[in-house]
Image (tube, grey):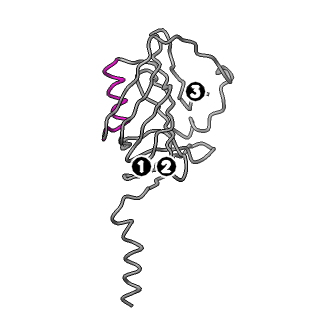
Amino acid sequence: MKTLTFAALLTLMPGLLFGTETRTEVVRTTTPAEDSKPNNPQVPDVYPIEGKFDRVVVLRFKYQTDLLAGLEREVKELHIRNAVILAAIGSVRSYSLHTVSNGTFPSKNVFFKDPDGCADIIGMSGYVIEGELHPHITLADPNHAFGGHLEPGTTVFTFAAVTLGIFSDDTSLKNLDDKNYR
């Protein structure tokens, strides 16, 4: 009996001592009317948005910096209105992301985080739209590559560098990530 109890304790102990990845699903409903509306024929299937970069900025993050909070702070301080995230490198010592988990409205997102999830930053893409961030990150650990929408709680390990291409002020990305603009 003591051996069985000790074995059970050894099995549970890593989960108690070390952080483990958690997952939570969230339904992202707007309204039933918005979620069920058909595509508007006035909205083209595909449309171009042209612009020129005013400048390119590389942001460098140090150990233990929250990646999303740092991005938000610099976008605000540098008065960046519209930009594209071109690249990123570095590593993280924890991560928090979300991904879409279904293909019908209302949309659902799965949020997953690991407070001890060390990984390399393989890349980052996304946009700054009217001053708001929409970043996606790809990470890799020794077992697999994974990614999703960057959430608070992704902290830098060795360093991180994120490159932004900042559009001129006459470029608008309005509606770019609006799921109801269809």
Q: Nearer the viewer, residue 49 or 18?
A: 18
- Using the rendered view, name the quadrant where residue 75 is placed: top left
Q: Which residue is mark 3?
A: 181
Task: Give the magenta range.
Answer: 64-78
Q: Secondary structure at mark 1?
A: loop
Location of the N terminus (image quadrant): bottom left
Q: Secondary structure at mark 2?
A: loop
- Using the rendered view, name the quadrant where residue 15 is placed: bottom left
Question: Mark 3 or mark 2, which is nearer the start of the sequence?
Answer: 2
Separation of residues labelled 2 and 1 (CA atoms) = 7 Å
Crowding at dot 2, Cα within 10 Å, few <14 / some 14-19 / many 20+, comes out as some
Q: Amino acid at mark 1?
A: Cys
Separation of residues labelled 2 and 3 (CA atoms) = 36 Å
| Residue 21, image x, y percentages | 44, 56
Q: Which residue is mark 2?
A: 141
Is disc 2 in contact with disc 1, using a CB cutoff of under 8 Å? yes
Which disc is residue 118 wearing?
A: 1
